[in-house]
Amino acid sequence: MNLAREIASLKEKGFSEERAQVILVMREAAVALFRAFPDSFLLYGGANLIFFHNSTRHSADLDLLSMTVEMPHIDELRATLQGGLKSLSELLGMAPLEIETLRSDNELKKLRIGSSDGRTLFTVDLTRMGSVLKREIEEHQIESASSDLIGMVKAVSRDLLLLQKAEAFLLRQIMKVRDAYDIKLLVSVGARLGDNLTKHLDYDLRWEEINAEQILERIEQVDEKRCDAELGNVLPEAELTELRSKKFQPLRDALMELFANWI
């Protein structure tokens, strides 16, 4: 992999130089972790969207779902990241990296990856998963940015990401606009809830007793003020300007399309 070319490609998409470098370090972390623990977890969340679905929303989390009864020990995860990120962090002038344990228990393991100047680059979050259909698991190759190694990354499909984002948008105690943005992105790249995932969401909404009025009320919360406040620092300026010109209506349109069966 040509490091300068990869950074230039990310900058063309609208990421700053600093954020482009962080994305490369996150990708390098994914390569290291999936090579060391090939059947231990699935990649989901914002990093999945950036790596495989062309998202331009900045994310500072490498979110992993555990696939095993016993998660890897936190010391194993830290050592894997320490060794796997050494070369790239040196090339980018970030070394030595700080890898700090923020939490380690049976439900969540969380590590903070920071640069030598004290900046937090991103976190690695490993949490337990519910059941995932095999057909909703994909494999992607990621090349190392500092060697000839290749990682085979297991990730949840875009359709399952859409379900996860739908659940997050409706079930979070406090609505987050980033979920609405991610839903818009996923719908635009062809993600859809098939019969099984639709039934899953329907069960969730019935269990949580969420009705059409509540769904519409939450969609109305995706207003200009909130969108501007929450997306202003995580989207490229050109994309943000376009959304502002449309009063962020594309986000609400995508939500109305996704939840059409329930409203």
Image (cartoon, grey):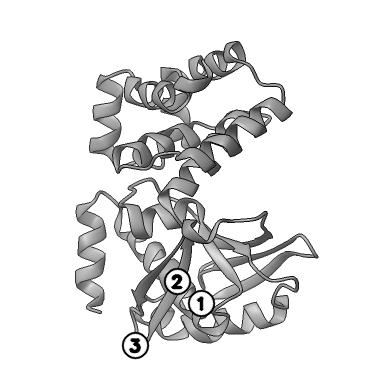
Residue under label 1, please give it. 34
- Three-letter amino acid code of the residue under disc 1: Phe
Q: Position of residue 258 (x, y in %)?
A: 43, 28
Q: Position of residue 140 (x, y in %)?
A: 38, 69
Foreground residue, 134 or 168?
134
Q: Position of residue 159 (x, y in %)?
A: 44, 46
**Other residues around mark 3 within 10 Å, as few (<14) / some (14–19) / many (≥20):** few
User: Residue 147 — which label?
Assistant: 3
Cα separation between marks 2 and 3 = 17 Å
Mark closer to the observer (1, 3): 1
Q: Earlier in the sequence, mark 2 or mark 3?
A: 3
User: Circle 2 sits in a helix, a strand or a loop, which is it?
Assistant: strand
Foreground residue, 98 or 149?
149
**Other residues around mark 2 within 10 Å, as few (<14) / some (14–19) / many (≥20):** many
Residue under label 2, please give it. 153
- The reply to whether callout 1 and callout 2 are in contact (CB within 8 Å) is yes
Q: Quadrant of residue 217?
A: top right
Q: Earlier in the sequence, mark 1 or mark 2?
A: 1
**Other residues around mark 1 within 10 Å, as few (<14) / some (14–19) / many (≥20):** many
Q: Quadrant of residue 218?
A: top right
Foreground residue, 87 or 96?
87
